[in-house]
Amino acid sequence: MTDLFQEPDDATPLTPAEREGLRQAWITHRRDLNEAEQENIVQGAAWARRQRGLTPAGILDDSFGRTLHRRMLGEVWDWAGAYRQTDRNIGVPPFRIGPDLAILFDDVRYWVEHETYSPDEIAIRFHHRLVSIHPFPNGNGRHARLMADLLIEKLGGAPFSWGGGSLADVGELRARYVAALRSADDHDIGPLLAFARS
C-alpha cells in the first residue's frame, strides 16, 4: 500500500483527509487507483456525450463542470464534484475558485460568441485557465481535458489527441504536457495548442 498515494512530482498531492475519501477498499496500489479512475472517467465521458441538447453555453456552467467531475471520479472518491477547501501547490486560493470559474465561463462564452480565437484556441485557452484555477482536490487535468474536448466538439471540431497517450504516468509525454502548460502560464499558448493536436 506504500505506493498508493505516490504522485508524480508535478502532480497535486492529496491531503490526509482527502485520502480518506477513497471509496473502494480493493484499491491498494497505484496501478489499481489509476485503473479505477480511468474506468470511471470513461463512464463520465460517455455520460457527458449522451447529454442531449448540450451546447457550448451548457458546458460553460458551474453545475455542469461539477457534475462532470463527479461523474468522472465519483465511483472512486467521496469528494468528487466538490471544490477543494485547502491551498495547493497550484491553483487559486479556495475562496477564489467560484468567482474565478464564473469569470472564466463568461470569458469563454464571449470568445465563442464573438469568434475571438479559432475554435481550437478557444478550447485550449479554456483548458489552460481551468487547470490554472485547479478547482478540485485531484483530477483537474483530466477534467479540464474532457471539458475542452466537449467544447471543441460542440464548436464543430474533433476531440484533441493530447499527445496520443496516457498523461497519468511519469514520462516524456507528461513532461511535454507540463512544459506546454508552463509556456501557456507565460502567455505563449502555441506549445499547448500544438501538444493538444499531436
Image (cartoon, rainbow, N blue to C red):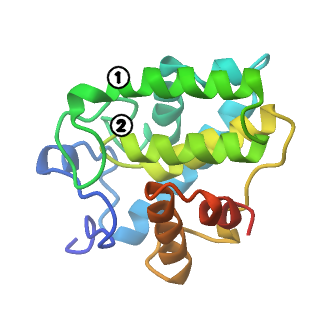
Residue nearest the observer in this picture, 89 or 194: 194
Q: Secondary structure at mark 1?
A: helix
Q: CA distance from mark 2 to mark 1?
A: 8 Å
* Residue in view at x 56 percent, y 52 percent: 39
**Figure quadrant of the N terminus:** bottom left
The amino acid on which the numbered mark 1 sits, given as a three-letter code, is Gly
Q: Which mark is residue 56?
A: none
Left or right of 15? Residue 11 is: right
Left or right, 145 with respect to 174, comes to: right
From this view, report whether residue 101 is shown above or below residue 152: above
Query: Which residue bears the numbered disc 1?
Result: 98
Mark 2 residue type: Pro
Element marked by disc 2: loop
Residue 114 x, y percent position in the rendering? 75, 23
Say whether marks 2 and 1 touch (CB < 8 Å). no
Mark yes or no: residue 43 visible.
Answer: no
Residue at the bottom extreme of this rendering: 172
Q: Give the farthest residue toward the left.
A: 16
| Residue 13 location, quadrant | bottom left
First in sequence, mark 2 or 1: give its number. Answer: 1
Q: Within 10 Å of the Cα at label 2, are there few (<14), some (14-19), or many (20+) other Cα atoms?
A: many
Q: Is residue 60 left or right of residue 197?
A: left
Rendered-image quadrant of the C terminus = bottom right
Position of 116 with respect to 11 (left or right) is right
All told, the count of numbered labels is 2
Q: Which mark is residue 135?
A: 2
Q: Residue at x 31, y 45 (%)?
A: 91
* Residue 25 x, y percent position in the rendering: 29, 52
| Image position, residue 41 (x, y; %) | 56, 47
Q: Residues within 10 Å of mark 1 (few under 14, many from 20)?
A: some
